[in-house]
Image (cartoon, rainbow, N blue to C red):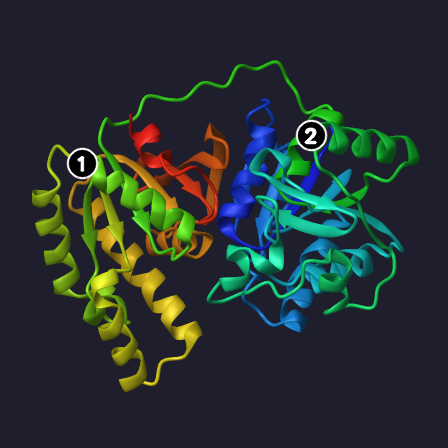
Amino acid sequence: MPKLLIIADDFTGALDTGVQFASLGAAAKVITDPHYDLNSASGLDVLIFDSESRHLTPDSAYEVVYEFVKRSRDSDFDYIYKKTDSGLRGNIGSELAACLDSLGLESMAFIPAFPAMKRVTKKGIHYIDGVPVAQSMFAKDPFEPVKESDVNKIIALQTNKTGIKVYDSETDSDMLMIAETLRESGGLRLTAGCAGFAGVLAKVLGFESGKKITVPQMPEKFFMVCGSVNPVTIAQMDFAESHGFKRIYLHVNDKLNPDWPNSESCKDFAVRTLAEIQGSHAILDANNPDEKTLTEEYIKAHSLTSEQVRLYISRAVTGAAKALLDSGLDARLMCVGGDTLLALMQAVNVHELVPVCEIEKGVVLTSYTYNGRNFYIMAKSGGFGEENLLVKIAG
């Protein structure tokens, strides 16, 4: 079996790409440490590095990706895949350029589509549910709004590299044809795209082991941790709440207080919440629509930047989740949003996760060890899934 290195720019992206290989029986691991000893990956088929570079400046993102890929040249990886966001958020151009420069290559294929999630590329224009991406929900992302729909223009915003070839793709068959063509021409050494093309790549490169992957036994209760403001996820939570899920909100004075996650108040919140959700599926939501004005006033009064708001909220919601775990929460955990998932893993001091399988398209089950116990957590990005997704998963 070949060895593959994947570079993703956020945690959920790393997981939903890695699981394309793990679900076929490949030994895969997701790491977050940029100084990870690549020699210790000798027993793996696929190593996925979360560079956490989506929210960095283009120059900083370039450096992180360049240095890690450059180090990989001394290891025995046969192929490298640069995972990008299916909504084309983040430092697309600078990170693709970093891969080319670090490997000393002149060209690479970029296949940004994910047809199974209704994200396609036609004549160089990227579409989300039939709408050009710059007119979709991704144009309203509060941290990384997408302002162009032409993929080449998005790349050109950050690099003048001319060797990045963008491929149109509207169906899984299109992507399979692209992969086969690239394999015949030797063009699979370095490729890029989202989890969509990764799934095709997994099969074309021969990662199928024949090993049957099954969903492990997990607790009956479902508990979701959410720091996302994506309208898709909000609709999913609204639907779940209307079907009996308990929805617990963080108040503005807690979620925007950087000291709250380590406070006695946070521990008390966890104890109260456990008592409130007994026997129920539940959602921990950082964004209370009834406190929208209060939140805006708090941000203004404390002169918080958008970056501070993003970090404080993710730390608060995951600090609460850690307190719940420490207080005895026994549930099928789900985390929405790469920032939120990373903050949770940092809170419990976990730096490696093992992808297990997909529960639903775009919903990845992974395992990790905390306080000597093995836990499972489901993860998805904010923009994935139908309205009834949470109800369907909870059963």
The answer to which quarter of the image holds residue 289 is: bottom left
What residue is pinned by disc 1? Answer: 244
Left or right for 212, reference 98: left
Residue 153 drawn at (x, y percent)? 75, 63
Residue 56 drawn at (x, y percent)? 57, 69
What residue is pinned by disc 2? Answer: 172
| Residue drawn at 38 percent across, 48 percent down | 233
- Residue 256's label in the rendered image is none
Disc 2 from disc 1: Cα separation: 37 Å
Residue 72 drawn at (x, y percent)? 72, 50
Q: Quadrant of the N terminus?
A: top right
Amino acid under disc 2? Asp
Amino acid under disc 1? Gly
Q: Is residue 165 above or below residue 261?
A: above
Q: Quadrant of the C terminus?
A: top left
Residue 265 drawn at (x, y percent)? 12, 64
